[in-house]
Amino acid sequence: MNYLVLNVREYSFKDDKDKVVEGATITYLDLDNEPEKGEKGLAPLQVSATTDQARDFSDVPGLYDMQFKHKRGAQNKVRVVFHSATFKQPVSFAQRPKVPSAPAAS
């Protein structure tokens, strides 16, 4: 499947029990998905990953083939978990819109 990875953000912090929590948040667009009723465009999605898995993302933004696994969550409900990613091609946002500058205060 085709996913446009927009951002990979690693994190490291101590929880309330002083345990170190490390990982990464992957923000992406599912290019094979259709907008939901009442929506226009594609909504960004996020998934958690380990810091080792985050290294799969060598070029961001970029087009990736991402693999997910299903795990049993609370009350036996399915939980989708990131498994791996394979880089397909770079993506460039060369034509960024110009943001008008704020008027000077008088």
Image (cartoon, rainbow, N blue to C red):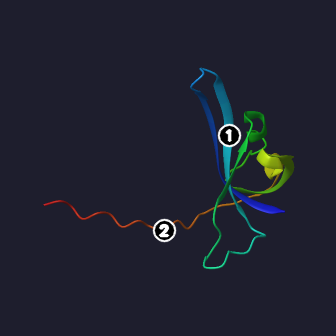
Q: Within the image, what quadrant is residue 29 found in?
A: bottom right
User: Please, what secondary structure does the residue beneath circle 1 have?
Assistant: strand
Q: Do the residues under discs 2 and 1 have CB atoms within 8 angstroms? A: no
Q: Residue furthest left?
A: 106
Q: Is residue 81 visible?
A: no
The quadrant of the rendering that contains the N terminus is bottom right
Q: Which residue type does callout 2 highlight? A: Pro
The residue sitting at 80% across, 63% down in the picture is: 2
Q: Which residue is mark 1?
A: 24
**Callout 2 crowding tier (Cα within 10 Å): few <14, some 14–19, many ≥20:** few
Task: Give the image location of residue 91, x and y in percent.
Answer: 69, 60
Mark toward the start of the polypeptide (2 vs 1): 1
In the rendering, which numbered label is found on residue 97?
A: 2
Q: Which residue does the image show at 36% across and 67% down from the upper left?
A: 100
Residue 68, placed above or below residue 32: above
Query: Residue pushed farthest front?
Result: 75
101 relative to 27, above or below: below
Under circle 2, the secondary element is loop
From the top left corner, tell me how far across and down residue 10 is, in percent: 64, 37
Q: Residue at x 55, y 68 (%)?
A: 95
Under mark 1, the amino acid is Ala
